[in-house]
Image (cartoon, rainbow, N blue to C red):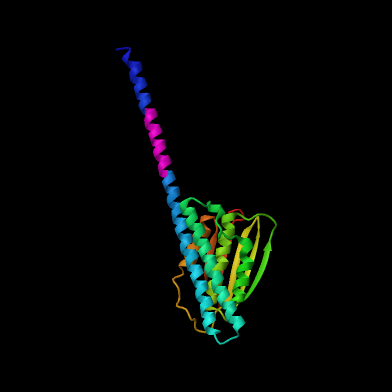
Amino acid sequence: MALLVPWSVAAVLLGVVVALAFLARTRGVLRDEMVRAEERARIARDMHDTLAAGLSRISLFASALQVNAGESAEKVANSAAQIRAAAHEALDELKSIVGVLRGTVGGRDRVGHQGIDAVPELTQSARAAGLHCTLTTDLAPGDVGTLAGHVCFRVVQEALTNAQKYAHDQVVAVVVRGAPECGIRVDVRNALSAEPSRFDVGSRTGLQGLTEQAREVGGTLEAGPVGDGFVVSCWVPWSG
C-alpha cells in the first residue's frame, strides 16, 4: 500500500502536466485562429476599400470625359489616360492583396500599400481631374509608422474622392501636420456645393471602414458637416 502512494501522486502530477499542456496548446490554436480571422477580415476590408476607391475614380474620370467630349483632343486624351492609370493602380493593389492571401507577398511588402509620403500624389491626381485642391504639410523629420501612414493616405484618398463627387466646384483644403510626441493630424475641408451632385449619396461605408482602421492603430476619425462646409478630421499616433 505504501508503494502505491508515490505512484498515485506521480500519476496525478503527470495528468495535471498533460492537461495543462493540452490547455496551453488549445489556447495557442485558438489565438492563432483569432489572429488569422482578424487578418482575413482586414484583407477583405482592404479589398473592398481598394475596389470602391478605384471604381469611384474611374467613374469620376469617365464623367469628366463625357462632359469634355467636345473639348480638344488633348483634354480627351488626358482624361482617357487618367482612366487607364486609375484602372492599373486598382488592379495592382488588388493583385498585391491576392498575393497576401496566397502567401506569396508579405503584408508589409504590398505593392499598393501607400503611406503618408504619397499624399502629394493624391492631391496632384485630384487637380488633374479638375478639382481645386490645396495641400499644406508640416511633418517633423522621422519615419511614420507603416499602418499609421497608410491610414493617413486612405483618409485623404477617400475625402478627395467624396469631394470630387459632391463638391467638385469647391476648393478642398488638405492639411497634414505631425510630430512623434503629438501624433499626426489630417484635416480635409471643403465648402458645401450649391450645385446638384451627379452621383447618388453613398452609404459612407468608406468612412466607416476608415474609422475602424484609425481605431485599430489607436487613433480617431470624425467626418461630417461643420457650419457651411464638410470636414474629415483624423488623428493617429506617430508610430502606429
Q: Relative to 85, does residue 45 appear above or below in the rendering?
A: above
Q: Residue 113: name its quadrant.
A: bottom right
Residue 130 visible? The answer is: no
Image coordinates for residue 186, horizontal then vertical, percent: 60, 65
Indicate whether residue 27 is drawn in magenta. Answer: yes
The percent position of residue 170, horizontal first and vertical second, equals 59, 80
Q: Residue furthest top?
A: 2
x and y, in percent, of residue 86 in the image: 54, 70
Main secondary-structure element of the magenta-colored stretch:
helix
**Residue lying at 59% horizontally and 59% vertically, measured from the top left:** 149
When the figure is inspected, residue 46 is found, relative to residue 128, above or below; the finding is above
Give the camera-side residue of 205 and 9.
205
Q: Quadrant of the C terminus?
A: bottom right
Q: Which residues are magenta?
A: 16-30
Q: Residue at x 52, y 83 (%)?
A: 66
Q: Is residue 96 magenta?
A: no
Most extreme residue toward the bottom is: 70
Give residue 8's quadrant in the image: top left
Locate the N terminus and report the quarter of the image it occupies: top left
Q: Residue at x 37, y 20 (%)?
A: 10
